[in-house]
Image (cartoon, rainbow, N blue to C red):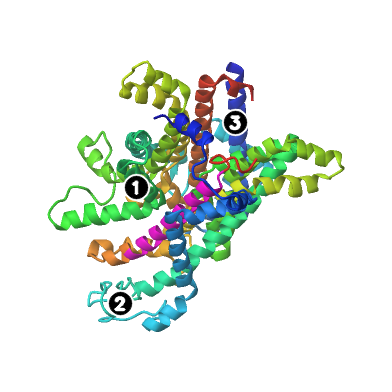
Amino acid sequence: MARFLVRRIFEGIIVLWLVTVGVFIIFYVGPGPKGVARALAGKSATPQVVAAVSHRLLLDKPIWVQYGHFLWLLLHGNLGYSFYHDQSVNSILAAAFPITLSLVIGSAILWVVMGVLSGVISAVRSRSLADRAFTGLALFFYSMPTFVLGLLFLLVFYYEFTIHGLALFPGSGYTPFTTNPFEWFRGLILPWFTLALVSAATYTRLTRGSMLDVMGEDYIRTARAKGLSERRVIFRHSLRAALTPIVTQFGLDVGILLGGAVITEQVFALPGLGFTAVQAITQQDLPVIIGVVIVAAAAVVVANIVVDAFYAVLDPRVRLH
Amino acid sequence: MSASMNAATALVEPTAPVAEGEAAKKIEGKSPWRLGYERLRRDRAAMISVAVIVFIILVAIFAPVIAAVIGHGPNEQFPAPIGVNSSGQPVGPSSTFWMGTDTLGRDVLVRIAYGARISLIVGFVATIITVVIGAAAGLAAAYFGGLVDSSLARLMDWLLAIPFLLLAISLVTIIGPGLPVLIIVIGFLGWASVGRIVRGQVLTIKEKEYVEAARSLGAGPWRIMFIDILPNVIAPIIVYTSLLIPVTIVAEASLSFLGVGIPAPTADWGQMIADAQTVYQYGAWWYLVFPSLALLITTLAFNIFGDGVRDAFDPRADQLFV
């Protein structure tokens, strides 16, 4: 097990290293050193400022020196400095991360509960009216682009409710939990449900399929034959065995979203990692873009390792490959 | 009664007595493709979704005809008080503008018809690029193994680790917006998942006896890859392609929504929805709702069709392929 983990972590580090090479090439080499210095210094910067920035970032040095410096800072946990915000990238990302985290944790709880429950009901009452309803709903939300659902929520629950005197939900923005827990909760309800409904659909389909597979197994018949209650057969015997693909999917989804739920954050103007990154891209704020991309890639890589480790614990054969 | 008992009785007695000639006709060989096609034809939901998809394609093709019949150009701006009201806001659905107007006083219905073109072109072309690259990479990785496999595997990990939307927005910002750029960026960033699926399939096929036989007959690697192996992974590739089209359409709409899609004034659903964000608080629900519905109906139809194709051709559902 230890050897397996060490190998996976090593592979993860290689992928992350490749990510740094990739983003470095795309962002530094792509627009050319002049473009980078101009972009970093800001639109109204004088040629002297551009030259100073260029010198300070080693942009007048050969490309491998630049990369070495970039990697050296990164290894010390320093993601660079945003001239646009006049702030270190670390502190910009540290301010944005709790917002993304609040969004992702809340909706993850919602989507797992909704997705797994509807999937179990669908599988247990296969071909019933409930099954058809849940499968249909799952397909509907699976097809729903996130921004469409978010904006339709805003149109109904923010705009229509508010003009009819029911100001239940704010239209945009984020209140930190430490400032006002109630406002934090109120402001996140719509984003949570938007992200959760769109994601839950996958879990409904996955749970249903996986449960149907498991419930055809002999040991489920044995469990029934022993006289166990149906509830026990469903939750203790079937669901437990059917959980593996669900946990895998969950790990990967959370990993991807922790790097920024770009669309949801954009629709509800939540200044999390995704929102920050999109803003940085329009402002050509390269260090911030690179910072978010690296953090997001790290989240995905870590999630992959966690999922693999989970797999390896459940199924010893995985460790051999 | 248990399912196995049913199966057992079915084995003993034929379900219906059939005449000799008819029975002979029944066991007449049908190719796996034909069986899959027949299953798809019997899937009512899939057939309805095909009708919807054909309708959307027709709308896209005949968008200029729709514009001519209605009498409003896609980029024609109707000034106050026709296209916008006295305070410059869009006007709602009426007999002149069936789906209302947008922020610039343009006909939303006509623009939705034109927007279908972008969605479908990107949806089809980018998906084909993705699948071709993914299939080629997966085939090469599994067939050659060794260094080719591990370097392609790392490249796929790389693509899957970097957030798609951020990379796509950055690339479009660097290269500059436009339809070809959008198609290439979406097409080139999404192939990793196809690559993994094809690689897995090829790995199992590679060990089959008939591949060994082909090799001992002196077939070269290209012949084995394309003549002996590829036809056997076509089914999962087709299933994946049909499921990928709606994903690609949403990716295009998302990029347009984030402001890096097709440059104005070309009509595009994602861009219309993004634009509607600025006016829905002033009551212009139609500008948000109608393009959203167009996008939702399109992705829903493609997803239902994709599900049907999977049910009809999925190798796991029936032991038809390998």
Q: Amino acid at mark 1?
A: Leu
**Circles 1 and 2 on the same chain:** no
Residue depth check, mark 1 versus mark 2: number of the one nearer the observer? 1
Q: Residue at x 43, y 63 (%)?
A: B52
- Name the foreground residue: B122 vs A284: B122
Query: For the magenta stretch, what is the residue range?
Result: B290-314
Quadrant of the frame with the C terminus of chain A: top right
Q: Residue at x 37, y 51 (%)?
A: A140
In x, y percent, where is residue A64?
Answer: 68, 42
Q: Would you say residue A175 is visible in this rendering?
A: yes
What residue sits right under mark 3 in the picture? A13
Residue depth check, mark 2 versus mark 3: number of the one nearer the observer? 2
Quadrant of the frame with the N terminus of chain A: top right
What residue sits right under mark 2 in the picture? B97
What residue sits right under mark 1 in the picture? A137
Residue depth check, mark 1 versus mark 3: number of the one nearer the observer? 1
Query: What is the chief secondary structure element of the magenta stretch?
Result: helix
Q: Amino acid at mark 2?
A: Phe
Q: SS at mark 3? A: helix
Within 10 Å of disc 2 (Cα), the crowding (few <14, some 14-19, many 20+) is some
In x, y percent, where is residue A65?
Answer: 67, 41
Q: SS at mark 2? A: loop
- Name the foreground residue: A214 vs B257: A214
- Name the foreground residue: B193 vs B4: B4
Q: Residue at x 35, y 72 (%)?
A: B108
Mark identifier at residue B305:
none
Within 10 Å of disc 3 (Cα), the crowding (few <14, some 14-19, many 20+) is some
In x, y percent, where is residue A16?
Answer: 58, 35
Within 10 Å of disc 1 (Cα), the crowding (few <14, some 14-19, many 20+) is some
Q: Would you say residue A40 is visible in this rendering?
A: no
Alpha carbons under labels 2 and 3: distance apart: 57 Å
